Amino acid sequence: MASSEEIQTLILTTLDTQGNIENTDSLRTADGAPIPYLAVVGVLNSLASKQMVTYTTIEKDHYSLTAEGNEIADSGSHEAKVFNAVDPKQGITIAELTNLLGPSAKIGQGKAFKNKWIKKESDILIREVTSIVDLTQQDVLEIRETGTHSNPATLKDLQSRKHVEKAKLISYSVSKGPKFSLTIEKQATDLTADMLANGSWRTLTFKKYNFAGNPPQGGHLHPLMKVREEFRKIFFELGFEEMPTNKYVESSFWNFDALFQPQQHPARDAHDTFFLLAHLTLEHLVHVDPATSSNFSDMEYVNRVKEVHSHGGYGSIGYGYDWKIEEAEKLILRTHTTSVSSNMLYRLAQETKANGGVFRPAKFFSIDRVYRNETVDATHLAEFHQVEGVIADKNLTLGDLIGFMQVFFEKMGIPSIKFKPAFNPYTEPSMEIFSWHPGLEKWVELGNSGMFRPEMLGAMGLDPDVRVIAWGLGLERPTMIKYGLDNIRELLGHKVDLDMIQSNSACRLDKKMGKELVGRDAVIA
Ligand code: FB9
């Protein structure tokens, strides 16, 4: 096979003598061999990168014979073999013919009948004509010689009979480029200190970087993580501190009791919450040791929680039931990141006590996974991401919460929101938040919010005038809306199309809501 230097010289000298090269498949090496087009194009690319030549690609259909086609070209078509096997007088039985010709017998008969060369009387084949012209053989011979055939229909027919196969013949027409010359100027590949020192970089030509290679396969952020980054940006812009949420397993105490959620509350049974059990049971199918945690560091606080649940306090009458620490010790998969908020607010109370009662306002946020043993449907999974914001300061009011919601959702590109009274065991008053979705012409539930109850904050040791407003929403819903996905399984789980992950566009939350509805209508819960 000719070297690229040899091919380079051949192309340059041919251009020099002929002015241009009509079709490179006419090029021959010194020993007369044609040059494979892949070798040619490699050389053409490097000459073109030096602007020494320009070239265009020529694509031509090329037909070649299959093994069967070559067999026919050499020894005649199946139908001709059949005809020749039929004795002009007695004819031949099909059985004899098959012994004689093998597979050709079956294939050839059909065509010979069609050509009215032979006919069948009972099971004897007899000739209908005295001589034949084996057009098929002639056709495949023409193709073998010329690589094509004058009659496109014949090409189609012989391809369908698997006698011929088509291939694309690639070649090039080449012309001199602006920097054409017979000598190849060695191009510098690196800018060296010497070149800078001796100034030779001014006159040298440098080899262009060939970025054509496959772009390096980088990692891809899942759309959920992109939307999470958008939320984090909003919170940081508003001066919030991120809460440590790397703890999916939580004690019922911080997830429920600290939030003044009574121990018989329906959300606290296994129908809504995943409990960790020391031993595998068919019913729960969760096996993690230990099932409970009893290392409460501040039993005084735990007893204040017990007290407020059982007998009230901080202006509350409490629930009046016998609060059990065993219930609080049960380990669960957290059902909300509010379990982290309760722990952070407790620390804030501790910190205030440590600062001699000087209270430091705080703004916390969390975005992480939570688990609810709920019925799974097109928009809900047992695991989803909760986005939560908490603001603790003196004398905050419901008005502050409403006002801040407008600020927060404005930053999400949601200009108009409205509130609907709601109920949460740990906030009073509580409000669901809705916004009008122009694309879907309906009010969309954005999330929930409220003011943490004094039973919760008082037990922690926060002063009565410290108020805490909080709100929460999901991450999945805004992500599905932004990316026009209408089933959560397109976002999470084994059915996710990885291309969507790899090609999903950047996400900007602050674009006016409703503008994201491109293509498929996003389904809103
Ligand atoms: O995300 C939700 N909806 C939503 C959010 C943003 C959005 O943005 C568009 C791009 C512009 C669109 C829709 N929801 C909350 C509402 C519903 O989807 C709801 O059906 C599902 N909710 C989840 C819980 O499901 C069991 C979303 C999740 C949710 C709900 C409430 C809270 C957190 C997450 C909370 C809270 C809370 C309340 C008081 C104090 C502290 C936290």
Image (spheres, rainbow, N blue to C red):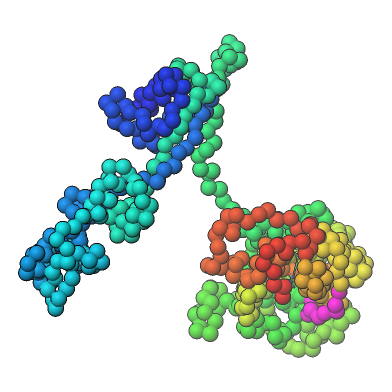
Find residue 119 and report its horizontal and vertical position in percent. 18, 70
| Image quadrant in which you'd find residue 311 | bottom right
Determine the residue positioned at 74% across, 55% down.
508
Q: Is residue 340 visible?
A: no
Q: Residue pushed farthest bottom?
A: 321
Horizontally, residue 35 falls left or right of residue 217, namely left
- Which of the two residues, 199 or 81, is positioned nearer the viewer here? 81
Q: Residue pushed farthest top?
A: 198
Determine the residue positioned at 63% across, 56% down.
504
Find residue 292 and report its horizontal and vertical position in percent. 60, 76
Determine the residue positioned at 76% across, 54% down.
233
Horizontally, residue 284 falls left or right of residue 41, namely right
**Position above or below: 417 against 132:** below
- Which of the two residues, 369 or 379, is positioned nearer the viewer here? 379
484 within the magenta span? no
User: Is the stretch drawn in magenta largely helix, strand or loop?
Assistant: strand
| Image quadrant in which you'd find residue 197 | top right
Q: Residue pushed farthest left?
A: 90
**Position above or below: 38 against 481:** above
Q: Is residue 210 visible?
A: yes
Magenta residues (range)? 419-426
- Which of the two residues, 209 or 277, is positioned nearer the viewer here? 209
Determine the residue positioned at 73% across, 61% down.
516
Ligand 1 location (quadrant): bottom right
Q: Quarter holding the C terminus?
A: bottom right
Find residue 467 and report its horizontal and vertical position in percent. 88, 68
Horizontally, residue 46 falls left or right of residue 380, namely left
